[in-house]
Image (tube, grey):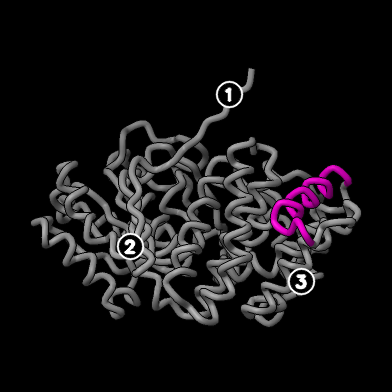
Amino acid sequence: MSAYRYYAPKCTLFGYGCLAALGEEMNRRGYRHALIVTDRALVKLGIVGKLAHALEEHSIDYEIFDGAKPNPAISTVEAGLAMLKKHACDVVISLGGGSAHDCAKAITIVATNGGNILDYRGTDKSTVAPLPLVAVNTTAGTASECIRAYVIINEETQEKYGAKDSNCMAAIAVDDHELMMGLPAGLTAGTGMDALTHAVEAYLSLNGFLLTSELAVSSVKLVFKHLKQAVTRSDEASREAMAIAQYLAGLAFGNAGCGLVHSMSHQLSAVYDLPHGLCNAILLPEVCRFHAREERVQERYAKLSEEVFPLECSGLTTGEKAELLIARIEALSEAIETRKRLSELGVREEDLELLAEKALLDGSLPNNPVQPSKEQIEEIYRTCL
């Protein structure tokens, strides 16, 4: 007997301008006083103001914690937790991308379970139901609004680790692509490649099953069709498509898990504080080539390539189909200017051994279809340098 478990938010709002409906949804659940977890950039852009207006329209009080950072750390969680306790908030609203959502998830868990967020490393470590989370998404990449995982940096050890907890799944998720219309091209590109990486890794994951595979395929198709447009000539249609693409990828990897790309990318963020999506974009093609050396994995890439590029795959061998997929990933990355070298981002060759050692300990690695050695991981980093 096979028993697969599938996790998703209880409710998700979609559509241009759907943020306006959030207050009604929160009133229905009895939420009265929110801690908004966000960053200063979204305050300056006026997006926090839009959220505040939606809450005020329904007489919901709020406090604003704007200390979320691109790679949330334990100290950030503790600062947000202190504000929550000071104002006795009964709900947490994360507004932003993955960093805000991850920070907020950690805050909700510690708020009711006590201790330090490090105490909850692993899977389903919390025993007390956390405060409810409302995740309002402003980027099309991380899908943190629709998964039960979160990633936090331990500043002392320079380690970026992931945890999963069913208790911190969003009670309400919001994917309003109106909030994404003004995203800068670079951020759109990086988060879009993050979504692509999520989908490809979920498709390859050892924990995947038919549902996650179908979600991943749909996501990959949407990314290849709409990401370049969203980056170069953004319009409502491309933004909506990317919002859906990243959500589908989230449902895929949120249940199947990620793999080696994320294991390696996490270390680059932890040691160098680099953008997660951009690191994924750089690593993804070379990790795919490493995997494709294994015949069974090459066949899996070929199948994905057939699903996404059926006409181009006609008459090709299995190996050629797999290489077509990789080449298309590189071409897309080139077109949206995420195809860079790690050395351009400040990564040093003398750190590669340390990065490889850390990657071996990452929680995403057990899902990977090939278990690499430290030397193989180091060589992939070096190829991307």
How many numbered discs?
3
Q: Where does label 2 land, which residue?
A: 95
Q: Is residue 131 visible?
A: yes
Q: Residues within 10 Å of mark 2 (few under 14, many from 20)?
A: many
Q: Given this view, does label 3 or label 2 mark the residue nearer the observer?
A: 2
Q: Position of residue 241 (x, y in %)?
A: 49, 63
Task: Identify the residue at image location x=23%, y=65%.
Answer: 51
Query: Which three-letter amino acid code belongs to the residue tagged 1?
Result: Ala
Which of 249 and 240 lies nearest the eye of the viewer? 240
Disc 2 is placed on an element classified as strand
Q: Position of residue 272 (x, y in %)?
A: 59, 71
**Segment tinted magenta in the rendering:** 295-311
Q: Given this view, does label 1 or label 2 mark the residue nearer the observer?
A: 1
Task: Identify the residue at image location x=27%, y=61%.
Answer: 19
Decide whether residue 296 is among the magenta residues.
yes
Query: Which three-letter amino acid code belongs to the residue tagged 2?
Result: Leu
Q: Where does label 1 land, which residue?
A: 3
- Earlier-in-chain disc, 3 versus 2: 2
CA separation in Å, label 1 and label 3: 39 Å
Are the residues flagged by discs 3 and 2 in contact, CB closer than 8 Å?
A: no
Decide whether residue 107 is among the magenta residues.
no
Q: Residues within 10 Å of mark 1 (few under 14, many from 20)?
A: few
Disc 3 is placed on an element classified as helix
> In the picture, residue 211 is in which quadrant?
top right
Disc 1 is placed on an element classified as loop
